[in-house]
Image (cartoon, helix red, strand yellow):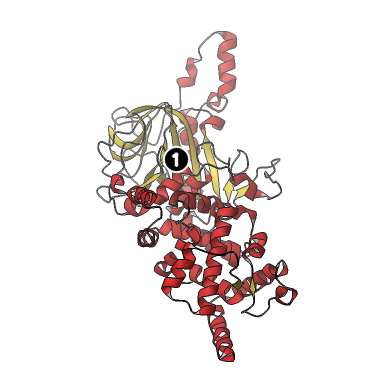
């Protein structure tokens, strides 16, 4: 009987292992061998090469990376224990449920149980995964929000790995843990709330009737309903994606491919790792003054795949480049696909993605790949509705048409509008923008611009010889600090800074 059980387990072990790639198999087996090297069991079990010999949860926790934190370490090892016990002892569903609620540190984790656990977490359907993730989440002891917070914090470390390219003379902020250390205190509140609500947001259901009600119910009853969690997980593709990034990087792919451009491009296209990010600001997570890493993850998730495999460059920053309108449009004209991020004087942060080049035109243009977004106070994405084609607008130097940058809606009622003085703007989406179904993005309908960043996420496809020359800026625009000093020294206002060469692209009488 014992031999029969051993043979059955061995067959099951090889069947499960065969569903991993050769590289993944090698990583899994090596990982379990490392767990056994620090095992506190008897010597004859210490080298645990057979799939039926187990290790303790403490031995595994010692080997897991510190970025996981104790919450997730406990969750994963508990699931490994339960899976090992259920396979080795052929437990019923009722007994497994009892183990879930009353796990014991004495339960050993077998090689078969470990490999089977990683298989269930990465190679099965979302429905099957949800049952495993529910045990990892330990919601009978903690809260859904705490689980998401820990998962986001750890997974973003691996998502952003290798994304930052320092400028000449800059160095990465490396501590003992390298780039991973700098994410531990990053603000992920917006993404956590977004993930909790995502199943509702995806189907345009009211946020008031959200999962928060289930969370309150769980707090009253003392545990989170497994069926409610599974339903939430199955519908939550973003959370599945982040969970898969974490499990894959820890247990199946410890390091990113080196010198394999196609492999890296594939990972970036699937949003499994961040694009390369080129910024003049500090190392991650302070690559942007307006965006946190968690914000960038969601924005990148909604970009077309061909915008994820490129280097993302901070094209314009009003803090760095000044707040001249001429300078602003000279930086963004005919560059390619861009993310425009605006912070108003009331602290709201919002913006839009334009897939097509910004061009000076007296009419609306763009395409359905565009979207608007809100970062603060709420992280939200507003894709195009198809209701009209008012995706983007940029005009300057005409008398009869609005001069400024707009996205969505119509003149005087745009989802996002920035005046050609780059000081004033408005978001007149009342109640929603027709083009993007976005609400008012700024705190007030008419707002004052505090800061703007523009990120180039894909270079233009246009031939440089076919790009017309845009409006020319004064030398004073490029040196706003020097201009201010000159005005102070002479006690005279430099009215000539308002004079510009005429815009030859657009007829003044249009």
**Vertical placement of 70 versus 286: above or below?**
below
Query: Whole-percent x and y of residue 241?
Result: 47, 59
Query: Whole-percent x and y of residue 461?
Result: 47, 53
Residue at image position (69%, 42%) is: 168
**Vertical placement of 183 versus 249: above or below?**
above
Residue at image position (55%, 8%) is: 491
Query: Whole-percent x and y of residue 374?
Result: 39, 41
Q: Quadrant of residue 115?
A: bottom right
The answer to which of 76 and 464 lies nearer the viewer is 76
The answer to which of 49 and 410 lies nearer the viewer is 49
Q: Give the farthest residue toward the right.
A: 43
The answer to which of 431 and 481 lies nearer the viewer is 431
Q: Give the farthest residue toward the top.
A: 491
Label 1 neighbourhood size at 10 Å, few (<14), some (14-19), many (20+)? many
Residue 355 visible here: no
Counting labels gives 1
User: In the shown orientation, is residue 129 left or right of residue 1?
Assistant: left
User: In the shown orientation, is residue 73 left or right of residue 199?
Assistant: right
Query: Whole-percent x and y of residue 237?
Result: 41, 59
Task: Please name the residue that numbered disc 1 is placed on.
Answer: 340
Q: Secondary structure at mark 1?
A: strand
Residue at image position (49%, 18%) is: 496
Split into 4 quadrants, where in the image is the C terminus?
top left
């Amino acid at each position: 009987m014992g031999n029969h059980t051993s043979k059955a387990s061995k067959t099951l072990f090889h069947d499960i292992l065969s569903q991993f790639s050769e590289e993944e198999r090698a990583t899994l087996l090596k990982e379990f061998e490392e767990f056994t090297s620090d095992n506190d069991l008897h010597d004859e079990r210490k080298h645990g090469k057979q799939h039926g010999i187990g290790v303790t949860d403490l031995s595994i926790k010692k080997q897991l990376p510190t970025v996981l934190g104790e919450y997730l370490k406990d969750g994963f090892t508990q699931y490994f224990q339960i899976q090992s016990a259920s396979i080795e002892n052929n437990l019923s569903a009722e007994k497994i449920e009892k183990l879930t609620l009353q796990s014991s540190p004495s339960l050993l984790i077998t090689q078969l149980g470990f490999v089977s656990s990683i298989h269930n977490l990465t190679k099965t359907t979302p429905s099957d995964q949800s049952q495993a993730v529910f045990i990892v989440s330990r919601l009978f002891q903690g809260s859904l929000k705490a689980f998401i917070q820990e998962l986001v914090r750890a997974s973003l470390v691996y998502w952003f790995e290798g994304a930052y390219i320092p400028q000449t003379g800059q160095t990465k902020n490396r501590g003992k843990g390298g780039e991973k250390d700098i994410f531990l205190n990053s603000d992920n509140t917006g993404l956590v709330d977004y993930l909790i609500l995502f199943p509702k947001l995806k189907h345009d259901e009211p946020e008031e009737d959200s999962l928060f009600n289930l969370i309150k119910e769980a707090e009253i009853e003392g545990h989170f309903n497994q069926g409610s969690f599974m339903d939430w997980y199955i519908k939550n593709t973003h959370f599945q994606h982040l969970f898969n990034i974490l499990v894959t990087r820890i247990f199946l792919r410890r390091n990113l491919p080196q010198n394999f451009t196609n492999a890296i491009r594939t990972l970036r296209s699937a949003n499994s790792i961040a694009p390369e990010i080129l910024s003049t600001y500090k190392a991650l997570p302070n690559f942007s003054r307006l965006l946190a890493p968690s914000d960038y993850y969601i924005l990148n998730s909604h970009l077309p795949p061909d915008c994820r495999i490129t280097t993302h460059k901070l094209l314009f920053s009003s803090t760095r480049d000044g707040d001249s309108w001429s300078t602003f449009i000279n930086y963004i004209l005919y560059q390619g696909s861009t993310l425009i991020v605006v912070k108003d004087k009331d602290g709201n942060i919002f913006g839009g993605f334009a897939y097509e080049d910004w061009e000076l035109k007296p009419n609306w243009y763009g395409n359905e790949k565009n979207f608007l977004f809100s970062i603060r106070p709420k992280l939200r994405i507003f894709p195009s509705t198809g209701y009209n084609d008012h995706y983007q607008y940029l005009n300057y130097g005409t008398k009869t048409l609005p001069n400024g940058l707009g996205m969505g809606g119509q003149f005087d009622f745009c989802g996002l509008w920035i005046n050609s003085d780059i000081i004033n703007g408005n978001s007149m989406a009342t109640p929603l923008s027709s083009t993007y179904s976005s609400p008012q993005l700024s705190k007030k309908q008419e707002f004052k611009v505090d800061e703007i960043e523009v990120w180039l996420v894909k270079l233009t496809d246009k031939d440089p010889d076919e790009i017309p020359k845009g409006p020319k800026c004064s030398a004073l625009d490029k040196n706003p600090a020097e201009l201010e000093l000159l005005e102070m020294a002479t006690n005279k206002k430099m009215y000539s800074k308002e004079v510009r060469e005429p815009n030859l692209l657009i007829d003044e009488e249009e």
